[in-house]
Image (cartoon, rainbow, N blue to C red):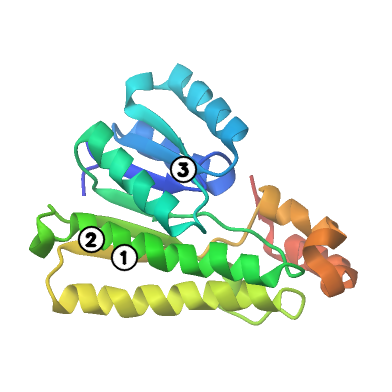
Amino acid sequence: MHVNGKVALVTGGAQGIGRAFAQALLSKGAKVALLDRNAEAGQQSKAALGEQFQSQRILFIPCDVTEAEQLRGAFKKVIEHFGRLDIVVNNAGVNNEKDWESTIQINLTSVIRGTYLGLEYMRKGNGGDGGVIINISSLAGLMPAAFQPVYCATKHGVIGFTRSIALAANMDNYGVRLNTICPGFVNTPILQSIDKEENMGQYYSYKDEIKNMMQFYGVME
C-alpha cells in the first residue's frame, strides 16, 4: 500500500512506539489520528508533529481503549474528520502484573476490539475500500517470561488472534491485510516500568534478570 494520502488511526499514539509509527506515516504523506488516554502527552505530540509536518494532517483524540464506546466513538470521529480510514495500528499497551486484569483489557481486549472496528469500517464487503491493520505484540509473545506472565499471555494472544483473523479476512475477501509486529526491548515507558514495584508486583525481584536480557538482546531507542 502506498500511504501517501491515506488515513491512519494509531492507539497509544502519544509516545513510544505509537508516536514513532505516527511520525513514520506522516513522513510518507499519510494523515494520522493519535488516540491516547494521556491527554497532555497527546496534545504535546500533536503540536510537536505539527511543527514537523502539516498540522492539518494530524488529529488527536483522547481515548481510553478499554472503554468500548470511547473507542468506537474515536473511530467515528476519524472518519468524520478525514472522510475515510485506511490503516489501523493497535499499539496501546501497558506492563502491570499487579493490576493484571487491566493489562488484559489494554493489551489484548482493546486490540481485538480495534481490529473488529477496523474491519467494520474498512472491509470491502461492508462498503469500505480495504486497508491494513497492524497489531503490536512483543518478543514476549514468542517465548515464556517468568517475570511477566500476564503481559506475556496478552502478547501471545495478540499473535494468535491476528493470525486467525487474518485467515478469516483472506477467506472472506475483506480486502484488509493484517500483520503483527513483535518488537524486542524498546526504550519506552513500558520498559521503564520494570523498575517499579507498583507495576511488577510479586515479580519485582526479577528486575535484574530482565536487565540482563536487555543487555543480551539490546534496547532500541
Q: Which residue is mark 3?
A: 35
Q: Is residue 60 left or right of residue 95?
A: left
**Kind of residue indicated by mark 1:** Tyr
> For mark 3, does the 10 Å Cα neighbourhood hold few (<14), some (14 to 19), or many (20 or more) residues?
many
Q: Which residue is mark 1?
A: 116
Q: What separation in Å lies between label 2 and label 1 (alpha carbons)? A: 6 Å
Q: Residue 149, how many percent across, how many down?
A: 69, 79
> Which type of secondary structure does the marked residue at label 2 adopt?
helix
Residue at figure coordinates x 72%, y 67% from the top left: 99
Residue at figure coordinates x 31%, y 39% from the top left: 77
Q: Quadrant of residue 42?
A: top right
Contact (CB < 8 A) between labels 2 and 1?
yes
> Which type of secondary structure does the marked residue at label 3 adopt?
strand
Q: What separation in Å lies between label 3 and label 1 (alpha carbons)? A: 17 Å
Residue 120's tag is: 2
Picture layout, residue 169 above or below residue 14: below
Q: Residue 87, how many percent across, how many down?
A: 29, 49
